[in-house]
Amino acid sequence: MTQRSIVEYFSGGHKGYRCGYCNSTDSCYSHGMWAHVLTPLDYQNLIDRGWRRSGKYCYKPTMNVTCCPLYTIRCEAKKFVLTKSQKKVLKKVHRFLAYGDKSKGSEGTLADKSDQDMDVSFECPQDIDMQSLKRIKKIKTINHSDIKTDQTEANTDSPCVSDSQSDKCDSSDQTTKSSHTVQPSSDTSSSPLKSSNLNSRPPCRKAKEIRKERKLQKLLQRGMSEEEASACIKPKTNESKSLEDFLHAPLPPKPAHKLELRLIPCYPKSKEFLSTFDETYNLYVKYQMAVHNDAEDECNKEGYDMFLVESPFEKPEASSSSPEPSYGSYHQQYWLDGKLIAVAVLDILPYCLSSVYFYYDPDYSFLSLGTYAALRYCSLVIL
């Protein structure tokens, strides 16, 4: 028997109601209907036209009227390319699972250290003999350079050169910052020392180029042609890691933590779902109160069951030949060392995977579980 969809459209006027984003009392507008039964394909066609569901209630925001227009974020999983920040999240989760590392990683520490090393000031010693410095009359040339120096500046009583030309170093200063630069002179009477050896000296070559040339010569001596030898020493391009490479990176023999993902049909309610209902509901209450500041009485079981468990999809006949999950609604549970830390409410449809809601344990917010779960969605679609 062919499945049919049965919906009940709400035509009782187009009135504004409270917005959950800007908290306005009557500025949110949408069209709504109650889906008694929906086939996965019919719902696929609805979401392609801007509809969404919350439980069995389906709605489409009136974009030109509503206060906060809602736009669906779509991602082509097979063309998806990881960003640098997403790779950092995957590495962070892997470090936590492998070693129990909760820190931001060593990269930030090294960056901070390098910044500190760059901020260096040079100071004149306090016990310097000022009279001996005054005997220095002038500096005409500097070896191995064509820089001209001003005689009048060299005759000053200052023991150091200031960062600013207008600042003068006084002999009473105990510590004075000096720069590494020598100010060029405008005095045309002082001529630089010119060396013919400097001009005839060949430019410096990198050690990498020298090694490459030596290797090329050795290959040519072995009888290779120039094309074959050049191909042998051609540097290999680093292939970027795929999403699957990051997600399935090997862990040590005894990892600090174990993460287990379970994809459980939530409606009609399966035995496995019912056995974990208390854990999923308690985690939902903890998340709503901590992240969205909901009162405890607002997070009742009836509301949770109505909007995050019930679904308009009837369970289709499972195919015994295919290990892949059937179309319908699921809870993707994230278990860390036997403890539930996150739940993703998902719809598996003919042409996409639709994320209905995601909630997690606020104690593990340092793992960026929202980003990590979205990457898991892409992996699920690709498989």
Image: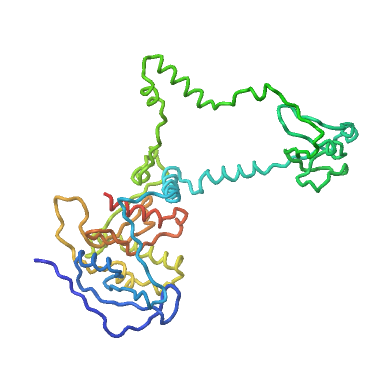
- On screen, residue 139 versus residue 38, left or right, reads right
Q: Is residue 325 left or right of residue 159?
A: left
Q: Residue at x 51, y 23 (%)?
A: 210
Q: Residue 278: x percent and y percent?
A: 33, 63
Q: Is residue 141 left or right of residue 342?
A: right
Residue 227 rendering spot, x and y as whole percentages: 37, 24
Q: Quadrant of residue 41?
A: bottom left
User: Which residue reaches farthest bottom?
Assistant: 13
Q: Is residue 156 above or below residue 32?
A: above
Q: Is residue 312 above or below residue 214?
A: below
Q: From the viewer's side, name the closer residue of 154 and 373.
A: 154
Q: How many marks?
A: 0
Q: Nearer the viewer, residue 57 or 190?
A: 190
Q: Is residue 262 left or right of residue 295?
A: left
Write down the quadrant of residue 27 in the picture.
bottom left
On screen, 240 above or below 360? above
Residue 36 occupies which quadrant of the picture?
bottom left
Q: Residue 78: where, in percent of width, then height?
A: 30, 50
The colour mode here is rainbow
Query: In the image, residue 291 lies at what x, y percent?
Result: 45, 65
Q: Residue at x 8, y 66 (%)?
A: 1
Q: Name the residue located 48 percent from the left edge and 46 percent from the top edge.
A: 101
In the displayed structure, 148 sits above or below 359; it is above
Name the residue furthest front.
188
Depth check, front residue: 310 or 232 = 232
